[in-house]
Image (cartoon, helix red, strand yellow):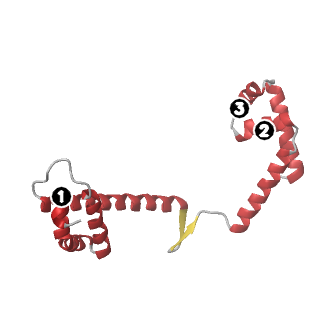
Amino acid sequence: MDEGDAHPLLAAYLERRADLVRYFKVRLRSEAAAEDLVQDIYLKIAEPPDRPVENPAAYLYRLGSNLMLDKLKQQRRATRRDGAWREATTSSAGQEDVADEPAADEALAARQRLEKVVEVVRDLPEPVREAFRLHKIEGLSHAETAKAMGVSRSSVEKYIMTSLRRIVEKLGR
């Protein structure tokens, strides 16, 4: 496309692109960030606006400034969010951050215990397994579990005791 065929805003952009990069490079203190911002300006103006722009150069600088402020706000929010996440998931030992995660061997042992519990639960009789699932996994009360299964609350209590007894027998405490 020839510059003469471009809409006035695009023509102004093409004419002032280098100036826009310099202007925003000073404000952002980064040539790469300025280049990205000027590219974002282009993406915003690639389609001609619905109504004519009175001062295309001023419009480009205003658009760039608004995009820059939006990016800076977004970065600040991300920094606060990341800081809050880091604070919530780590603790400090002197000057070093330590993740609040179990040691790898503890995590592996816990995973292996869980696999054994799942294996024991799979081998339970159907009504006992269903009561265990509804009460321990889904979080239903004994009464809610009894209603869902169509049995008495006493039966649910017996099923839960049976499942827990079987798990302790197979795995120990």
- Vertical placement of residue 68 versus 157, above or below: below
Q: Which of disc 2 and disc 3 is earlier in sequence?
A: 2
Q: Which residue is mark 3?
A: 141
Would you say the residues marked 1 and 2 are in contact, meaning their CB atoms lie under 8 Å apart? no
Residue 132 is labelled as 2
Q: CA distance from mark 1 to mark 2?
A: 69 Å
- Vertical placement of residue 18 versus 134, above or below: below
Q: Tell whether 160 sits left or right of 58.
A: right
Q: Amino acid at mark 2?
A: Phe
Rendered location of residue 23, percent (x, y): 19, 71
Rendered location of residue 55, percent (x, y): 10, 58
**SS for callout 1:** loop
Report the front residue among 16 and 156.
Answer: 16
Residue at 32% x, 61% y is 71
Q: Tell whether 64 sits left or right of 104.
A: left
How many other residues sit within 10 Å of disc 3, few (<14), some (14-19) or many (≥20)?
Answer: some
Report the front residue among 78 and 22.
Answer: 22
